[in-house]
Amino acid sequence: MGTWDSGNFDNDTAADHLARVIGRLVDEVVAAMAGDPVGIEPDEYGGVVVPCNVELLTVLARAGYGAGALPGRAVVEEWRRRYVAVWERTIDGLEPTPEYRAERRAILDRTFDGLAEVAAEEAD
């Protein structure tokens, strides 16, 4: 095992583990986006997990982890387009309050924007 510093991710085993975690997060989003749109409706597992994974990827990248493992900005923007289209088409069927609907949409926008920004920074 190669160790290059004293941090939690500063050795080969930890770096491999982190790469697997990031890969799993990305793979789950990719699978959800490629699947039946019903799977990413707001009350479905994918509809809940996709924004969670997007935010986790953003947090990891902003902490300095995930370089080279994140999707490109165009991919993230396509995820956002697809996810938000399904969300907009189905959220009213769950009868949210207008306040919840507006707050949740703003959070979704910030979530996808955050990963798109990090992906763009990685590309530079």
Image: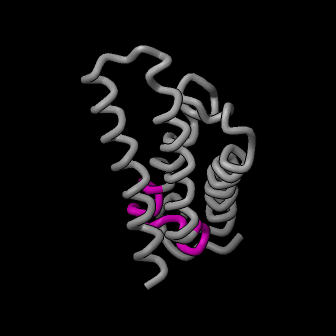
Q: Residue, x 50% and y 42% (percent of image)?
A: 51
> Does the magenta-highlighted stretch encompass residue 110?
no
Where is the C terminus found, in terms of image quarters? bottom left
For image coordinates 50% across by 40% down, the residue present is: 52
The picture places residue 114, in percent across and down from the top left corner, at 38, 57
Residue at 58 percent of width and 65 percent of height? 75
Q: Position of residue 101 (x, y in %)?
A: 33, 27
The percent coordinates of residue 17 (x first, y second) are 67, 56
82 relative to 36, above or below: below
**Quadrant housing the N terminus:** bottom right
Q: Residue furthest bottom?
A: 124
Asked whether 81 or 89 is in front, the reply is: 89
Position of residue 103 relative to residue 51, above or below, is above
In the image: residue 59, left or right of residue 13? left
Residue toward you, 23 or 74: 74
Point out the stretch of residues depicted in magenta: 58-71
Residue at the extreme left: 99
